Amino acid sequence: MKKRKNSILNFFIVLVLLNFLNEIPVYSQEASDHAEIGRYGSSSVRHQELGNFSEYILALGPVRNDSVSESLKIEGKVMMTLYEGPADASSYEIYHAYRDLLSSKQYDILYSCSGSECGTGFLSPVYQLAPFAYNYGYNNSVPITNGSQDFSYLITARKSIGEKTTYVSLIVSQGWFKFPVYKLDVIEVQKSGGKISSIQVAKEDSPSAELSSDRCFLHLKTVPLFQLKTIPLLCKVNTNFSLFKERCFYFAGKLPG
């Protein structure tokens, strides 16, 4: 009996872990640079978040009284990337390189500052204008917000060609790590395409198999656990528990029997 309970517990632990992995955003192994504004030298991606249509707030002025004095809210396709700079590079070196790159690509520099020019304690207020959605343990914000203000820089730029407008926001910081870090965000202004639709799903009277001719239980909440005997390899399990948010998992092996 004890062995049976442990098997059931292990099965649900597997489902929880699969659900957790499904929630993880785009990270280093899947991340890529923006086609026009890439990374500096041998920099590596620490974290990246993408949005086909999101809000974004740009800093256009220094920080005063713990808030950005002037800002601009825009909407569009957003790519936010946190890079770890080369160990032998300075934060100023990275800032200077991007400023030159933006100018060479016909971007207008809307705002640029360094150190105290950006305002007292400017790193956190500027970061909070457009923070990462995923920031477990503050690992994706602290390298920026807790850097040394004296070795930190900010650039906001814009380029318009025809009906296409692109903004770039760059925060470069150094001090939290031995190497510099920088948050490079590229926003392509656009309107929402409108993707709302209604899908009607027919109710099933009983569990059925999708991927195997053998018996496969798809809706766990409709079948008592003691009735679950076996499940074919790679059988698709559709859990309707609110804990799993109706996500689908692939489970290789057998359920406790």
Image (spheres, rainbow, N blue to C red):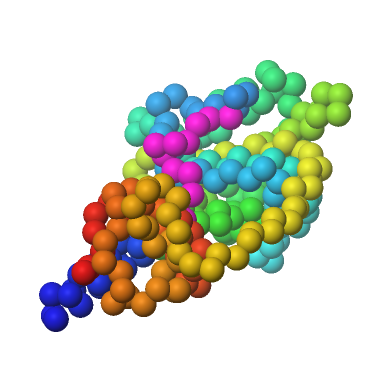
Q: Does the magenta stretch include residue 27?
A: yes
Residue at 41%, 69% (x, y): give it.
Answer: 220
Q: In screen coordinates, is 132 left or right of 11?
A: right
Left or right: 87 in relation to 171: left
Our reading of the magenta stretch's main secondary structure is: loop
Question: Picture coordinates of residue 15 (x, y %)?
Answer: 35, 62
Query: Looking at this rendering, what residue extends furthest in the top direction?
Result: 104
The percent position of residue 78, horizontal first and vertical second, equals 65, 42
239 up-or-down from 151: above or below: below
Q: In this view, does 182 lie above or below 4?
A: above
**Which residue is drawn at the image coordinates 33% and 48% (left, top)?**
234
Q: Where is residue 58 in the image (x, y as percent from the top left)?
A: 72, 48
Pick whichever, 107 or 246, lies toward us.
246
Q: Give the range drawn in magenta.
A: 18-34
Q: Does the magenta stretch include residue 149?
A: no
**Which residue is situated farthest in the right direction here?**
162
Q: How many labels sit on residues?
A: 0
Residue in the image at 60% along x and 24% along y: 35
Residue 136 can be seen in this image: no
In this view, the residue in front, 8 or 36, is: 8
Instruction: Compare residues 140 and 232 and report the one nearer the observer.
Output: 232
Q: In this view, does 218 lie above or below 107?
A: below
